[in-house]
Image (cartoon, rainbow, N blue to C red):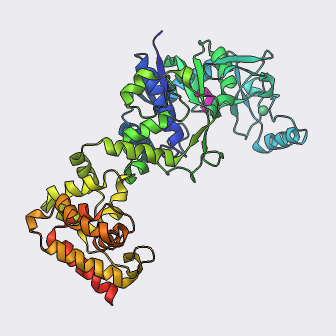
Amino acid sequence: MQIRVRIAPSPTGPLHIGTARAALFNYLFAKKNKGSFILRIDDTDTDRSSKAFEEDIKRGLLWLSLKWDEFYKQSERIDIYREQLLKLLEEGKVFWCWHSQEELASERDHFIRQKSAPRHICEFRDLDKKEARTGEKPILRFKNNEKEEVVFNDLIRGKIEFRPDLFGDFSVAKNLEAPLYNFSTVLDDSLMKISHVIRGEDHISNTPKQILIYRALGFDLPEYAHLPLILGKDRSKLSKRHQATSLMQYEDEGYLPEALINFLALLGWREANDDGEELFSIDELCKKFSLDRVQKSAAVFDVEKLNWINSRYLRFLETKDLAVMLKKYLKPAWKIKTDENPERWIKVAALEQPRIVKLEDITGLVDYFFEEPFLDKEMLLWKKQNAGDAIKHLEKIYELASDLQDTDFSKDILEKTIMPYAGEAGRGEVLWPFRVALSGKTTSPGPFEIAEILGREETLKRTYKAKETLES
Ligand SMILES: [Zn+2]
């Protein structure tokens, strides 16, 4: 069998985590089985669909390297839906329901009061259109005569059964030009020869209605696989509170697409060997992926995990490549300085590489390489150190460092020069004020590494300034 899978996002919002995960799982399944991955934009709701969201979805998928093999827009297929709706009307499998919104609402309330599932068993189901009311806008409903349980075998969840009488005569189109979700989905999945429908668990309740439509149209059923829900870390349904508004926001913040792919794969998929390995390239995922290893229980969206994965991928990068990526996040004035001295910028990037979680962090980490830091008196003092001691140590460092030539101003030589003194006087006592003098921060790389990049003149200047600050 030729494997063909699809995702069918609505362009009524930007690409979000759930759709991106469904896209990845479909993509991996297709690639593993040498099949086709189809992108179908579900834009039949013309009021709510927008071109901008369609572009956001496409841009996000391409950013993740999830390139589709075929592309369709449902808004361009209205004639196809219309033709099949007319055929089903002729065969008496769908019919026009003339009930008003008010009538349907009061019927729904009635069922809810009786504590049973709201459904509409329509008295127009067996009438000719001519006998209908005038002045109302009718909708098309599926004539649901099914009494047998609708059963399907979900590749992830096993056998799932539904009582079809609970759906009543469900709607399939607002009119011949406006098919509703379940109808257009089934028709397209059939015509596009989709072999496996892999989608989120929230679609399980649509599946029995879709199976009834498949039967009415006389098409073979696809295989179904419903992916587990994605919950926030607080175990509530994933919402805007938990995730970025669009997947593209992750790009803006400086997550790598490789890291996001890896993270999405772990949202419900367990690696085959259970050896604890959690980092996979997309090629590895293509090889290893299988639906058997998709979990039934909900997956948890944990941004800390994403951050951890991203920081690992940032460490794997060649420093010179990282340095280029980071420049985008620098202030314009800093960018000019990095262009003037690219070697220095690569050294800074190397220093921060083990510390960056996402690229946008860089601005807050390296400001002191571009601008003189603001020095806080309290911060300059190590624990309960008194200012007099700190001044004494800074003076000593100044003296030792000024004896060095420009060319000797390397991390190693500085260390050799200053560490014997720090060893005697106390490492924290000596190195803390020195490091804060250079960086203005409570956390940063070590003072010798910073000093090497700042150079002799700037290091001496900042050391002296720290001493003055403490004296003031
Ligand atoms: Zn009706």
**Rendered location of residue 405, percent (x, y):** 8, 68
Classify residue 103 as left or right of residue 293.
right
Taking the image in four quarters, ligand 1 sits in the one at top right
The residue most toward the bottom is 472
Q: How many marks?
A: 0
Region rendered in magenta: 179-184
Q: Does the rendering let one see residue 1?
A: yes
Q: Looking at the picture, how far across and down is residue 454, in whole percent?
A: 19, 67
Residue placed at 78% from the left, 37% from the top? 99
Residue 285: x %, y % from top left? 42, 27
- Is the stretch drawn in magenta largely helix, strand or loop? helix
The answer to if 465 sits in the magenta stretch is no
- Residue drawn at the location 66% of the way across and 25% of the way down: 207
Q: Which quadrant holds residue 452?
A: bottom left
Q: Residue 31, located in which quarter of the rendered image?
A: top left
Q: Residue at x 39, y 68 (%)?
A: 442
- The residue lying furthest to the top in this view is 1
Magenta-span inclusion, residue 181: yes
Given residues 471 and 255, the one toward you in this image is 471
In front of the other: 90 or 27:
27
| Location of residue 314 in the rendering, given as x and y in whole percent from the top left corner | 34, 45
Q: Residue furthest right?
A: 114
Residue 385's place in the image compared with 451, above or below, is below
Quadrant showing the C terminus: bottom left
- Could you tell me if residue 41 is visible in this image? no
Viewer-proximal residue among 70 and 256: 256
Residue 305 located left or right of residue 173: left
Q: Is residue 285 above or below residue 256?
A: above
Q: Dividing the picture into quarters, in which one does residue 382 lie?
A: bottom left
465 left or right of 443 in image: left
Up-down relation of residue 324 to residue 124 (above or below) = below
